[in-house]
Image (cartoon, rainbow, N blue to C red):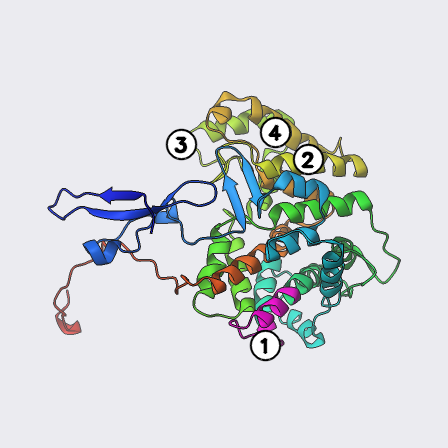
Amino acid sequence: MSEKLATLSFTDGTPSVDFPVNSGTVGPDVIDIRPLYNKTGKFTYDPGFMSTGSCASKITYIDGDKGVLMYRGYPIEHLAEHCNFLEVAYLILNGELPNQKQNNDFVSTITKHTMVHEQLVSFYSGFRRDAHPMAVMCGVIGALSAFYHDSLDINDPTHREISAFRLIAKVPTITAMCYKYNMGQPFMYPKNSLSYVENFMYMMFGTPCEEYQPNRVLSRALDRILILHADHEQNASTSTVRLAGSSGANPFACMAAGIASLWGPAHGGANEAVLNMLAQIGDVSNIGKYIARVKDKNDNAVLYGFGHRVYKNYDPRAKLIQKTCHEVLDELGLKDNKLFKLAMALEKIALEDDYFVTRKLYPNVDFYSGIVYKALGIPTGMFTAIFALARTVGWIAQWTEMISDPDQKIGRPRQLYTGQVERAFVPIGKRK
């Protein structure tokens, strides 16, 4: 029992009630309001869960005011600089960075699971050629449970581990197949001789016509993007995965639910919105006009890629991906490209404008990731699909943690009812 207490008092004569105040290892304290309804007959009201902690977690920590992001206690800057994606995936899943043997075994296991069931290939032909990749991913990943019956017991730790391996290994294959299907190109089967990210790029951009040659700069850039997107605490899609999982749904269904949530333009679709905004601005000479529209309360213009629900400082991921962005543009000789010059000019103006600085609207990870994807030749429709590829690791870890939590219950938010009070039924012939 917590020694710290919070007292809730009322003006309607209801007696005051004490609630325990619990402390985490770092970050704000939380008031445990679970007894609230039983003690008072009242609920809290918190649309968007702005002030609500939905669970206890050991995976990711964010301090939005200081611009801090840590996976399992490691600052994101250190992981992005010194690790590859599968090392970070191991950390997120297991709580510790792998030693050499653990890393070799993990990489080997993931590599050997990258193939998908051949019958799954026929699923793609059921979609229109121009179907959004996220629609396809929702369907295909949700269907994985129909192919892998041997690992669906969510109460068996071994089954959960096998499902984790399969999802981390197969989602890149499924994502690349979405792209190939849209393009009308043949699917490229995975190559065990390539690294995780090189293999994904090979399946995306390779063709049977010629040998694919990985580019180390571009592969490292995408690897870093995956690390930066691997987890981000209790965001909308992660909360969706946990909520779906709380009902006892299988992990493949939960991942499909997360993908559906991620698809929204306010979440995973923001980097696609950035490029649409840049296309709308069109030229460096039009930036001033667009900025004026953003400042106009009567205009609906939005500066996409700036500001964040949690970060009230510079998004630490944005600093890392900014560097990656410039490395990619240099490697591909695109520094003078009109679109990228426009993006860099907009970044400079927004960072120096008091309107955005005072409101702490700094560039976020979505501003730069869309630029990098565009430079790599990835179409905008695939941006969120690659985000889902990266976030799969975090979703699995969060789902596993929830299943193992003794306090876990089926998610059931309550509401503030504002509809009609009870009224008499009127037969149809007597209704006005």
Q: How far across and how far down the image is residue 397, in percent? A: 56, 58
Above or below for 405 versus 25: below
Which labelled disc corresponds to residue 339? 2
In three-dimensional space, the C-alpha distance between marks 3 and 4, rounded to whole angstroms, equals 24 Å
Closer to us: mark 1 or mark 2? 1
Question: Mark 4 or 1, which is nearer the eye?
Answer: 1
Q: Position of residue 168 (x, y in %)?
A: 65, 61
- Mark 3 or mark 4: whose residue is earlier in sequence: 3
Q: Amino acid at mark 2?
A: Leu
Residue 132 visible in the shown view: no
Q: Which residue is mark 1?
A: 146
Residue that label 3 marks? 298
Per the image, the residue denoted by label 4 is 347
68 or 7, which is in the foreground? Answer: 7
Q: CA distance from mark 4 to mark 2?
A: 12 Å
Q: Secondary structure at mark 4?
A: helix
In the rendered structure, which disc, 1 or 2, sits on the residue that comes first in sequence?
A: 1
